[in-house]
Structure formats: structure tokens, C-alpha cells
Image (cartoon, helix red, strand yellow):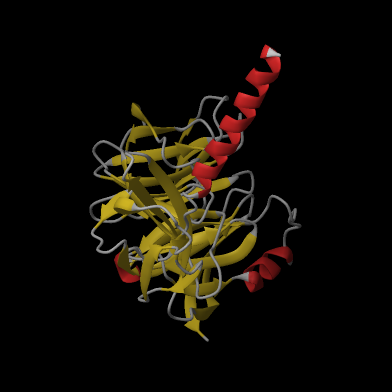
Amino acid sequence: MKPIYKISFLFLSIIMFASCESKYRLSIKAPSKAILEDKIKISLSEENNYPIKEVSFFVNGKEVTSTNSSFTLDTKDYGTGKLIISAMVAYGDQKSKRINKSVEIFSNIPFTSYDFKIINVYPHDSSAYTQGLEYYNGFLYETTGKNGKSSLRKVELKTGKVLQKIDLNKRYFGEGMTIFNDKIFFLTWKANKGFIYDLETLKFKNEFSYNRSREGWGLTHSKTELIKSDGTSKIWFLDPKTQQEKRYIEAYTDKQSLNRLNELEFINGKIYANYWQKPLIAIINPNNGIVEGIINLSGLVKEMEKSQKLLKEDDVLNGIAFDEKNNRLFVTGKNWKKLFEIELIKK
């Protein structure tokens, strides 16, 4: 009979444990979606039947001040994107439980649509699988991708002639680049590694890693930070001295997130981002992630197709450069034989 007693005791223990656990039924009361600048009350659900000793709330891992098991979330303090709301609940019997809920914040303004006008057309190397593009002191600097074909180049604008070039090690798939403090920062795709080169000589100086962001896609800079995309809706801000990822924003319109953001350019205080495999450039507020504008360049793709057969999968729009001194905007694509200077037209 002893084995039967043991089984009965184990069964009874399981029932008692399950009964205790049922007293800890908790959830966070919050909307799943909100609009930027909304103020949302966050609280625990009323399902709980067990005395709570203490509650601590967190937003994206950082503790916030709360009273009476609730707090008010001011969305303008966080910008657009998905916020993870967490609650750590302590009970009188010294047990604790952590629960989570996500709240997605959308832009509170509709974006402005832009068309374009072609101002000038310049030759571009059709073998260049363009990943990064930047205008600096009268020249274009360009990085190209694909394993075994990735390179860093200095290019003459008017002729498209490659004046200097270094090839990336064949095991790396080159991505975006930017110039900051006389250094060229060059990303790779999935290796979680970037390289630093001397601007004048293109000689290798150092390398760095990026571990919080998923991959390396596009790169640009403001006056104080490097700005990086990783193929999602996130745009990361890096310390230019240490290359450490400090924070990120998420690009959102009033209706959706913009994923697969690629090549970047920082123009007049805004982030311009290519949308991978779509002939669009998003204009993003770096302070809160709001997509303030969308540039539709589908007409530019049609213009290219008049003189060059494009492969729909690979030969897509990618590459943004800005001549700040002369207010000139340049765009091109992967393996395009033309580079365009365009003027934006608000619709």
C-alpha cells in the first residue's frame, strides 16, 4: 500500500500548489496600441485574490514611479515603437512574480508625401552593388556589398571614375558607411563587425563590434553620434569614440511601423532612410521616430529602366548622399549605371 500513499500524497501536493498559483492570477491593464502624446493609465488587473505587499513598474527595463499599484505613461517621453511594460509584484509571503505587456505607440501626425524632379544625371559604376553613399569635400564615397565583391571607394562625381578603392576581405558582406572626424566607418552585414579607415589614405585603422543591434545595414552621422540601421524598424545611435550602441528609436507612421530600413543619410536634422526593395525614402525625426515624410521614387526606377534592364530582386534603389554646402541631394541604386541629383516636390 505504501506506493499508493506516495502517489496520493504527490497528487494532493500538485493540487494544493495549483490552487496557490491560481491566487496569483495577474495581468497588466493597458491598451495594446496608443498614439504618441497620449497619457495612459497603467495598472494591475483586478483578477488578483491574494494580498500584494509591493509593486514595481518598469518601462523598457527602467523603473518608473508608481502609486497605488498604477502609474501614468506619458508616451511623448518614449517616442514611437513598442514599449515593454513590466510589473514586479511582491506578496506578503515573500513570493514575487513578474508580468509583462507590450504597448505599441504610433505617430500622432500623418506623413507628408513627396515626388521628385531630376536636376542632373551622372554616370555610376553598374558593377557597384551600392550599400553606402556619402558626399564629402567634392567627392562621393561609396561602399559596395556581396561576399567577395565588397569594397570601399572614392569616386569622382561628374565622371563616375573610381579614384581610390580597397576590397573588403572575401568573408565579409559589406554594408553602409559614413565619414566622421576624418575616419570612414564601414559596416558588415551579419558579422557583427565594422571597420574604421583613414579618410585620406583608406588605410585600415581599427574594427568595432555591434551586439545590441541585430545586423549592420545603413550608417550615417549627426554632429555628435553615428546613426545605424539594422534591417528592422530600429535606428541606433552610437558613440563615435567607442562605437557603443547608446539607444534607439523605432520608425512609425500613424498607421504602421517601417521595417527593413537600409541606407541612411542625415539631412537638415532628419534621418533619410531607404526602404529595402521598395522605391521609397522615409524622412524620420531622430528625436521620437515619427516618419514625417515619404519620398516616392518609383518614377526614378522607371526612368532607369528606359536605359538599363533592372533585376527586380537585386537592382533596387539604394544610396543617398547630400551636398550640404550646395543643397544637392543624390540617389542611386544597386548596380545602376546612373546617379541622379534630384529635387523634392511636396505633394
At 52% from the left and 62% from the top, the residue drawn is 331
Q: Is residue 241 left or right of residue 41?
A: left
Q: Residue furthest front?
A: 1
In the picture, the quarter occupied by the N terminus is top right
Q: Quadrant of residue 209?
A: top left
Q: Quadrant of residue 81?
A: bottom left
Disc count in the image? 0
**Residue 325 in view, yes or no:** no
Q: Nearer the viewer, residue 13 or 80?
A: 13
Figure check: 324 above or below 60? below
Where is residue 290? Give x, y as percent: 42, 70
Q: Quadrant of residue 116?
A: bottom right
At 37% from the left and 66% from the top, the residue drawn is 42
Q: Residue furthest bottom?
A: 347
Q: Is residue 173 left or right of residue 203?
A: right
Q: Nearer the viewer, residue 4 or 268?
A: 4
Q: Nearer the viewer, residue 48 or 44?
A: 48
**Residue 24 in view, yes or no:** yes
Q: Is residue 137 left or right of residue 255?
A: left
Where is residue 82? Give x, y as percent: 46, 59
At 61% from the left and 36% from the top, the residue drawn is 146
Where is residue 305? Give x, y as percent: 73, 64
Q: Nearer the viewer, residue 37 or 4?
A: 4
Where is residue 216? Give x, y as percent: 48, 41
